[in-house]
Amino acid sequence: MLVINALEARQVKNEEARFIVKRWRTQLRSLAVGAAMLCATVGYAQEEPSGSFIDGEYVEGYVYVPEFTSPQELKKLIDEKSTDIVIVDTAAPLIWEEERISGAVNFPWAPTIALPVGLPRDKALVIYCACNDHEDSIDMAEKLTHLGYLNVTVLEGGWFEWLDLGYDTEGSAVEGVPR
Amino acid sequence: MIPSKTIRLALLCSAALLGIPALAGGILSGLDVGEPTPAIPVVDVTGAYAGKRVCYVCEFQNAPNVLAFFRDADDATAELIVRLDDLYRRHKAKDFKAVAILIAGPDAKPWLEELDRSYGIEIPLVVFGKGPQDVGMRLYKLDPQVRNTFLITVNRFVESNVADIEPSQFDEVTRAASDMLGKIGDR
């Protein structure tokens, strides 16, 4: 009788243990599913758009990489009196009035570009700034590209290199100064 | 001759209008709060580009910074530059930048070099290439009568403008810079 009771007791314990293990498994499975769903949601929320709007159209995977024109190339185009280019100075109007690359138009850098943009779309734009590392001209070139200007380059070395090379400038500060 | 009633009224209105900015603690010198900071070429004296024309506004780009303009190369300016340098050292880990611009122009170069040697200044000390006649004066709306102008800026916009202070009032600049850095931290 004692033996039977002992066996029954063990059987009950085994069933309890099995039930506990089963419950744990169910809970662990729910946890795993929950964690997976959470990770997926967080991943989705953190995913940044990899593209950009170019001329009103979203271009997936777009990364702006500036293209450069060397001062020598620009000088050659100016000397050839090329009508295919527009030189764009990003300086403030006061600075542009004082001195600029000969023939350059003024389109001052601003945190946001005011529309409509008064620059031609059928010409090659060569943008420059008086910056250490083309900061303002690259920023401007990128903004114009987003507005659909697809033939935009940055003048390598910018204004400072142009001056160092002794190339022609014009403006109120250089009027009457022989170069 | 007694001016007519209309002229007297016009004079009274003009006086009132001129008085408003002073009463409201208006800007004494420099760009107003909210204005963008345009590129401004200067001549570097002690910075990374010593001897060259450079644009620190462009280099700082969106980083929080102080553009400090000083009229005179004197003791008060020296003390303010040392304090500004100290402010920079305390916050440089937060990408904070600062530059001291001497309006006096290239004549102030030896004085700035001596200041740098004496105090081991870390911020770039620069000058306006054409001195008080430089286009930067008009571009940044600097009043030539005002001794100093501190523009506390971030993202190429002026956040605060502190002008014509004594060295003992430098706390105003410290407070404005701390407020700006605090706001950035909260974003």
Image (cartoon, rainbow, N blue to C red):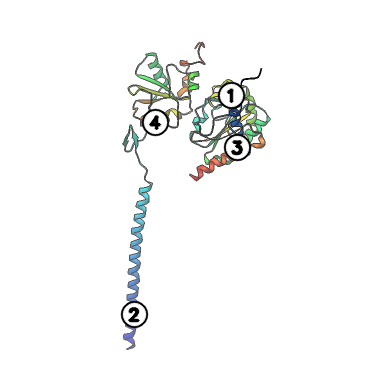
Tell me, for residue B173, which label it has, or none. 3
Residue that mark 1 sits on: B10
Instruction: Tell which circle, 4 or 2, labels the residue nearer the N-terminal end.
Output: 2
Chain label for disc 3: B
Tell me, for residue A120, which label it has, or none. none
Q: What residue type is labelled 2?
A: Arg
Quadrant in which the N terminus of chain B appears? top right
Label 3 Cα crowd, 10 Å radius (few <14 / some 14-19 / many 20+): many
Cα distance in 3D space between marks 3 and 4: 34 Å
Compared across the picture, whether B108 is left or right of A94 comes to right
Cα distance in 3D space between marks 3 and 1: 38 Å
Q: Quadrant of residue A90?
A: top left
Vertical position of residue A80 compared to residue B164: above or below: above
Same chain assignment for discs 4 and 2: yes
Camera-nearest label, 2 or 3: 3
Cα distance in 3D space between marks 2 and 3: 80 Å
Same chain assignment for discs 4 and 1: no
Instruction: Tell which circle, 3 or 1, labels the residue nearer the N-terminal end.
Output: 1
Label 4 Cα crowd, 10 Å radius (few <14 / some 14-19 / many 20+): some
Q: Which amino acid does label 1 sit on?
A: Ala
Cα distance in 3D space between marks 4 and 1: 47 Å
Residue that mark 4 sits on: A143
Chain label for disc 4: A
Q: What residue type is labelled 3?
A: Val
Camera-nearest label, 4 or 2: 4
Q: How many circles with numbers are drawn on the protein?
A: 4
Residue reaching furthest to the right: B75
Residue reaching furthest to the bottom: A1
Cα distance in 3D space between marks 2 and 1: 108 Å
Residue that mark 2 sits on: A10
Residue at horizontal 47%, vertical 16%? A169
